[in-house]
Amino acid sequence: MSTVHFVLPSNVDDPATPSGGNVYDRRISDGLTALGWQVREHPVRANAAEVLATLPDDSVVLVDGLLSSGIPPAQTRRLRLVILMHMPLENELERHLLAEVAAVVTTSFWSRLHLLDIYGLPADRVHAAPPGVDAAQLVPGSETGSRLLCVAAVAPHKGHDTLVAALGAIADMAWSCVCVGTLERDPGFVDRLRGLARGLAPGRVSFVGPRIGEELDAEYAAADLLVLPSRAETYGMVVTEALARGIPVVATEVNGLPEALGHAPDGNLPGILVPPADPAALAAALRGWLEDSELRVQLRRSAQHRRTTLTSWAVTSEIVASVLSRVAANVSVGL
């Protein structure tokens, strides 16, 4: 049985702080175990260096990239390190680290190409393992399409201010919007958003905090449209979670979001892409969705077709396992 040490965030299973990165780490750990790997988890709060110093020479180690800053060069030579890169920091420390480790796994094809571009890494050492998604029950949606859902930590980079401004521009229309996601990242930002939302009429925009499991499933089941106005997004797992239910998506055309949205087999988009930080463009997309019943039918059909092309977490785990196996065998990790 092959062994991998997995250095991951200490809050990986905390229901109060769900995130795409934490979900990814948990699913990969469980997926590797299902494939026969012995996974030794090392939860840490901020930095992997202390844990790495305790591991035997030549250990195969998968490190969440958020915890990789400050890893001494000696550890990259002593251990067989694979960095799991969620979002590049784009600094010199990261550049030097990624140049020295055995392999890098990214969570989207966009981020793989981005790393190759900014750091000039050898292409055969950087591998994309996009998130999988669980099969889910089809959500038919309402006739009016008025139930909007945003699933994201409430923080500036997720673009909730753009969303609230766009909703203000279509206040004359019938809609409600539920924002699911932790409210702890930037309390001042949350307070400002709530103040703006109250100006639209009580109850139209709700900030309900984090949801996981059946509670999150219930939010999707009640939704007509997922809206994700992020300013930056490596992939956007909530996009495929919505599509797995046949729910169309309005998202920003930034980073890995177009990859997550993808296309239906006939080439049509299962949603609408808009520029980031552009309330007018987002408002126009939402108005079009609410006004045009034929557009709603078309996008729902495309979302249902896109649903059939989504891949499972088992596929993602197999990609990561293949990289780790080659690193363990001390051979080139080019796939």
Image (cartoon, grey):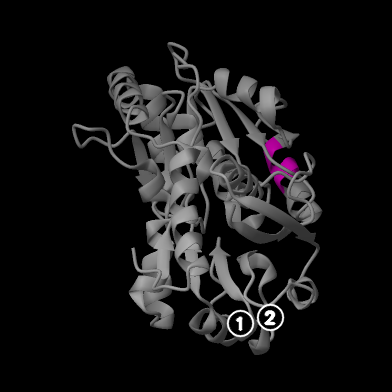
Residue at position x 30%, y 21% from top? 301
Residue at position x 63%, y 20% from top? 218
Disc 2, SS:
loop
Where 64 falls versus 153 (above or below)?
below
Q: Nearer the viewer, residue 254 or 125?
A: 125
194 within the magenta span: yes
Circle number at residue 71: 2
Where 137 falls versus 199 (above or below)?
above
Where 166 falls versus 224 (above or below)?
below
Direction top: furthest residue: 143
Q: Nearer the viewer, residue 301 or 51?
A: 51
| Residue 287 as seen in the image, left or right of residue 187 | left
Residue at image mark 1: 76
The quadrant of the image that shows the C terminus is: bottom left
Q: Quadrant of residue 125?
A: bottom left
Q: Do tag 1 and tag 2 residues touch (Cβ < 8 Å)?
A: yes
> In the image, residue 113 lies at what x, y percent?
36, 67
Q: Name which residue type carries label 1.
A: Thr
> In the image, residue 333 lies at what x, y percent?
40, 69
Q: Name which residue type carries label 2.
A: Ile
The stretch of residues the image draws in magenta is 193-197
